[in-house]
Amino acid sequence: MQGRLNIPSMRERVSPEEWEVRVNLAACYRLVDLYGMTDMIANHISARVPNEEGAFLINPYGMFYEEITASSLIKVDFDGNILSKPDFEYGINRAGYVIHSAIHKARPDVACVIHTHTWAGMAVSSLPCGLLPMTQTAMRFARVPRHRYEGVVIDLAEQARLVEDLGDADVMLLDNHGLLAVGPSIPEAFSNIYRLELACRAQIAALACGQGLVMPDQEIIEKTNYLYRPDVRRPFGILEWPGLLRRLARRDPSFCE
């Protein structure tokens, strides 16, 4: 049993711009694994292919996040057609295609979409209160919409309701399901899912104590959120991304292959 898949490099077969996105997307998969947000082979992260209208990259269904490399990613169009992939048996997850193609098509401002099934995300998505602005981390998000659970997301008819519920938000709770985050770049999308996950874990931990919650005044919540707006401060995720890539490279640089 081999420890790694032998996947030929795609570097010389794609544009430099696409290769850079592939490396960053593979890094994002590794980081989601590193920070404990994976569900074995389930879930998906996608990134728009630069200079190629209607195309995005997504993971092969069957590979673990810790195995994803720049060359293993599959290129898909908005109609679900596979445009390119390595010579292996893996395809794409149907739910991944339905969710990610819908958002990329409806939100040209979104370069990356991340969906997770973490214990904290599933728990908060099942609470009537949703995500509470009880911590500074949670206050970062001005709006956390919800999408009502309709079963496993394989029906194309659900796409319209999914994008309508998301609107122009950066994050969303998928009721009884998990979390979703988007961003204008891969680093910013990762920062959004990381902070959303952190806020969910803090909320579940506090509620588990059974002591009630100390909630800030609404004025303070709004003031804090204002200071986190992208037009007020630098975008989240950009400053730490090089450091995150260095951390991955120290552990296992194969994501760049």
Image (spheres, rainbow, N blue to C red):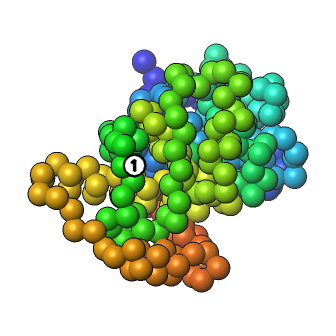
Q: Position of residue 31 (x, y in %)?
A: 46, 51
- Which residue is depicted at the point 53% across and 60% down? 143
Q: Quadrant of the N terminus?
A: top left
- Count of number-bearing discs: 1
Task: Identify which amino acid the numbered label 1 is placed on.
Answer: Gly
What residue is shown with label 1?
130
Q: Position of residue 71 (x, y in %)?
A: 67, 39
Q: Quadrant of residue 219?
A: bottom left
As drawn, is 103 to the left or to the right of 142?
Answer: right
- Which residue is depicted at the point 34% across and 42% down? 127
As drawn, is 73 to the left or to the right of 191?
Answer: right
Q: Secondary structure at mark 1?
A: loop
Q: Out of 198 and 82, give the one closest to the viewer.
A: 198
Q: Out of 240 and 216, give the one closest to the viewer.
A: 216
- Which residue is depicted at the point 77% across and 26% down? 80
Q: Out of 74 and 155, give the one closest to the viewer.
A: 155
- Disc 1: CA contacts within 10 A as few (<14), some (14-19) or many (>=20): some
Q: Position of residue 63 (x, y in %)?
A: 52, 28
- Which residue is depicted at the point 16% across and 48% down? 208
- Residue 86 seen anywhere in this rendered image of the structure: no
